[in-house]
Amino acid sequence: MATTPKLPIDLTPTPGFCIKSTVVNPATLKVFINICYDKNVPPPPPADEEIIKRAMTAQDDNEDLYHVPVVVSHPREDKDKAGNPSLVIDCVYNTTLKSRTLKDPEFKMFLAELALQRIEAQTLSLTLSRQIGTPNIAAKGKLEPRRVWVPTWLATGQQAPGKSEIEDNVAGASASQESPQRITRDPQRLLWSWRKEGDQQLMVVVAVSKETPYDTIAQAALDIEPRRLILRVPGSAKSPPLELDIDLSRSDAEIVATAPGASAAVLHGTDDDDKMKEPSRTLLLKRQRDFDVDQASAEWRIAEGELVIHV
């Protein structure tokens, strides 16, 4: 299967409203979901009011008539008012939808439900409670600029090729109440390296098996923030889900503690074991400049089994 052509879009989300849910298991983990907006997120297709209402009430099985693209961020850790651990996720819609949420409570809850569905579909491991709260805040934490890649047909307003090709981190969310089918296997961490090109250019090279199916590569989600790079490749019948999260905003101790096979030796310059290479790489990259979100680009080199990301 040929890969779906994609275009980069730059996002600077503005806050809309925040909802609070919990993870069903463990039920004590709170999840704050920032519903926010950006003009560069593709808008939903033109539709008359009857079609929109049918989508809102899940009365129409034809999702192609009215699908709402949404950019879903990777979950990030935070704390609630009591200081307990929580997750924060941004869901970014097109700016044109904001005005309706201010005057139509049902449409507002429609976007909230779509956000919950897309988070469950993208994270694979989270099942969220539909008993939600509405904190008196526009957004939990700071909304960072980012660059994401979307299918060309979606970014340019062309005719949709079908829902099967809208499974990216920008996706046409449906109004169905049913939870999407999940891949239960744990994500496999991707191997990576980085190097400098010239005086300023940073290059991150991610090793991806040449046997990875084209259709899963086409559905890969890449999110680049100033101090973080997240890559997720969904699983298939023949391959497990793949994941890479390079978070340079964490402390040195956190980077070492959470790296595979890591120990305090890395912090003290005694890293002579192959297992120590990953935290060392991350610590060295952390000391470089921020990622250039505006100029970032990515290239799949399938024949070579790698993804090259310029940041």
Image (spheres, rainbow, N blue to C red):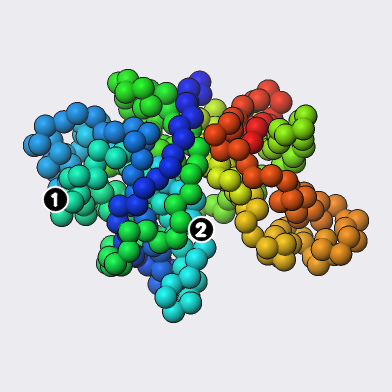
Label 2 vs 1, first from the N-terminus: 2
Above/below status of 167 relative to 270 = above
Asked if the residue under mark 1 is in contact with the one under mark 2, i.e. CB atoms within 8 Å, the reply is: no
Residue 66 located left or right of residue 18: left
Can you tell which quarter of the image residue 238 is in? top right
**Residue at left offset 86%, top offset 64%:** 268
Which residue in the structure is indicated by mark 2? 76
What residue sits right under mark 1 in the picture?
A: 103
Say if residue 171 shows up in the picture.
Answer: no
Q: Secondary structure at mark 1?
A: helix
- Where residue 215 appears, x then y in whole percent? 50, 30
Residue lying furthest left in this view?
A: 50
Q: Residue at x 88, y 60 (%)?
A: 269
The kind of residue tagged 2 is Arg
Q: Nearer the viewer, residue 140 or 191?
A: 140
For the C terminus, the quadrant is top right
The x, y position of residue 267, in whole percent, is: 82, 63
**Residue type for callout 1:** Lys
Q: Residues within 10 Å of mark 1 (few under 14, many from 20)?
A: few
Position of 246 relative to 236 (above/below): below
Q: Residue at x 75, y 54 (%)?
A: 283
Disc marking residue 214: none
Q: Is residue 76 left or right of residue 35?
A: right
